Image (tube, grey):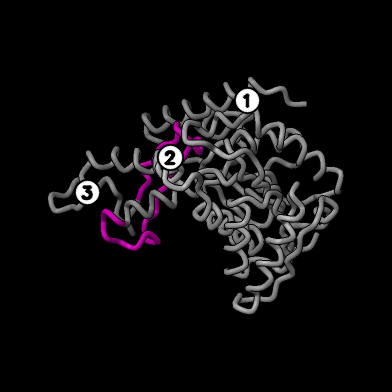
Amino acid sequence: MKKNKVVIVGTGMVGMSYAYSMVNQGTCEELVLIDLDKKRAQGEAIDLNHGLSFAPRKMKIYAGDYSDCKDAYIICITAGAIQNEDETRLDLLQKNTKIMESIIGQIKKSGFEGILLIATNPVDIMTYVAQKLSGYEKSKVIGSGTTLDSARLRYTLGERLDVNPKDINAFVMGEHGDSQFVAWSYALCGVQPIYQIASRNDSKIEFDDLEEIEDEVRNIAYKIIECKKSTYYGIGMALTKITTAILENENSILTVSSYLEGHYGHEDVYISVPSIVNKDGVREVIHLPLEKTEKEKLDNSISIMKENIEKLDLK
């Protein structure tokens, strides 16, 4: 494997926002674009190459095919049906499972042995599908999960508290979708618990605001889709962060879609929980002793994932 080679399958808005973010951050040395529409992939590669004189590092960018997957370190799958205004992420399940079957079959034929990063929605279930179809080690098949949702939460809290969102340490857990929830019992602003801040008389947020903030974070994607048909910049940057954590062996804690093997009392499911991410994918799932209501929300989210998985006919 080439340590700094990344392949993107799908050159739609998500895939190209991810590619553009990586070029601007100098995330990798070699970037391959694969799409059913080969001309589009070629055009996107040419366009990105024309900006390399402004990028922080030299990169090799080109349109390729599945034979280019063999020596890649990371393959990120962004291909899939677009979520319409009247659809939830789970409504994309059957359509994107068929697309995933085709893609994984081609990747396996290439001899790829690296890390699969899944962004296709519904991402927690698509990550499960990708692992089952590929047979790859579970820790090496991960989804973008609620990494973006957690970033949305940090932004929103930062705005309310007038604090740099980088100094907010808070996580969205569960499904990247309608059953997600905020683990408020572990949410911090700097070193102060959010619960403690909300209890102060002079605070900019109150306990009643927390539910409103959680709803805003959960539903903001629908507003973006209503305004401009799809979301892509935020997830592109979130994927870049995950990619950097892998390539740089950062041991970063991110809420990626991780496989549970007894964690939180569940088995055989991918769900978004805080996990340590490094060169091997998910090094460790962090087990948080959640409050009773938070644990119930996680159980509910996992039940929804399993119910939908049962509807699939995985070959």
> Residue at the spot x=51%, y=40% of the render?
287
Of labels 3 and 1, earlier in sequence is 3
Q: How many marks?
A: 3
3D distance between C-alphas at marks 2 and 3:
24 Å
Foreground of the two, 118 or 54: 54
> Residue at the spot x=71%, y=55% of the render?
40
Q: Which residue is mark 1?
A: 309
Amino acid at pointer 1: Ile
Q: Which residue is mark 3?
A: 205
- The percent position of residue 189, horizontal first and vertical second, equals 32, 56
> Residue at the spot x=22%, y=38% of the render?
208
> Residue at the spot x=43%, y=41% of the render?
226
Q: Residue furthest bottom?
A: 53
Answer yes or no: do the residues labelled 1 and 2 have beta carbons within 8 Å? no
Q: Which quadrant holds the C terminus?
A: top right
Q: Provide the residue span drawn in magenta.
A: 159-187
Query: Could you classify mark 3 by the number of other residues whose Cα lies within 10 Å: few (under 14), some (14-19), or many (20 or more)?
Result: some
Viewed as shown, does residue 236 lie left or right of 210? right
Q: Which quadrant holds the N terminus?
A: bottom right
The label shown at residue 222 is 2
3D distance between C-alphas at marks 1 and 2:
24 Å
The part of the image, by quadrant, that contains residue 131 is top right
Amino acid at pointer 2: Tyr
